[in-house]
Image: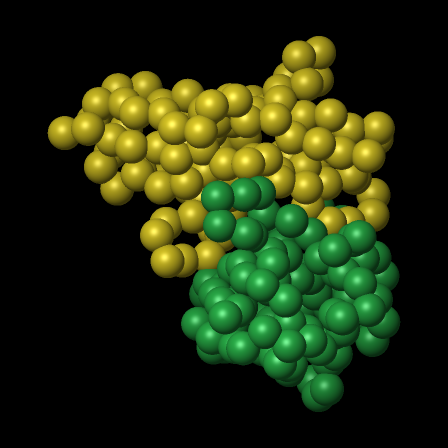
Amino acid sequence: AQSVTQLGSHVSVSEGALVLLRCNYSSSVPPYLFWYVQYPNQGLQLLLKYTTGATLVKGINGFEAEFKKSETSFHLTKPSAHMSDAAEYFCAVAPSGANSKLTFGKGITLSVRP
Amino acid sequence: EPEVTQTPSHQVTQMGQEVILRCVPISNHLYFYWYRQILGQKVEFLVSFYNNEISEKSEIFDDQFSVERPDGSNFTLKIRSTKLEDSAMYFCASRGRGLQNQPQHFGDGTRLSIL
């Protein structure tokens, strides 16, 4: 079984500041990990994914995430926040090697202050 | 870039009525999914569909729910007799063939409101 924990429901940063959104997962098999972003009144857009290989993955809009197996974490970072980054961010896990469902965390709302 | 499209964007229905939510997945995709998100809660998996049959379903997906791919392009979710607790945003997703690590692509969702 898989589960995702995203602590906190809201993160607020200043424009230009570091963004760090935390995600911890639990999986009984090697996981595939994903970050999705949801802008108001829109669907879920893939930011980045980890499947195999390099543990530091780069995504769209300057975001990146690092898979740390020992910590069961997949935290999302961006060096410098932009106003347009304000959205809801979801971490998700799927078991590898199967056509499987995504299990989502509850999401974190990111606000960016001018 | 190809997109998953969902219609309608908002559906208002009386409790007990049947509702059909429609999705057009990306054209060369083979794996299809429905998820829902009750207001303020997590996105939850409902069902996955491959090769014209359900491959996995959650506890939420009871006898009131069904899915169908009636032609080569549409993928529908039917709720036979809606309840108040079915009010949620419903997302369709699709995934391509090939490597297992293909990501799922989501539509913009249908907001279902049950009165």
Q: Is residue B65 visible?
A: yes
Relative placement, left or right, of A17 versus A105 is left
Instruction: Place residue A14 in its image quadrant.
Output: top left
Q: Colour of chain A?
A: yellow
Where is residue B48, by image quadrant? Answer: bottom right
How many numbered discs?
Answer: 0
Task: Identify the residue at horizontal 74%, vertical 70% (top origin).
Answer: B65
Image location of residue A26, percent across then percent down: 73, 25
Measured along the vertical axis of the image, is residue B30 above or below residue B36?
below
Q: Nearer the viewer, residue B78 or B73?
A: B78
Colouring convention used in this rendered image of the protein: by chain
Q: State the image coordinates of residue B53 (x, y, percent, origin top left).
A: 85, 71
Left or right of residue B82, residue B12 in this image: left
Q: Position of residue B34 (x, y in %)?
A: 66, 62
Whether residue A59 is visible, yes or no, is no
| Front in this rendered view, residue B47 or A71 | B47
Residue depicted at 71% across the width and 11% down the height? A70
Kindly indicate which chain is depicted in green in the rendered structure.
B
Looking at the image, which residue sits at the far bottom? B71
- Residue drawn at x 55%, y 36% is A106
Q: x, y (%) of residue B1?
A: 46, 65
Residue positioned most to the left:
A114
In front: B115, or A25? B115
Residue extending furthest toward the top: A70
Residue B24 lies, with reference to residue A111, above or below; the image says below
The residue under the point 30% across, 38% down is A86
Instruction: Tell me if residue B63 comes above or below residue A63 in the rendering.
Output: below
- Front residue (pair B77, A22): B77
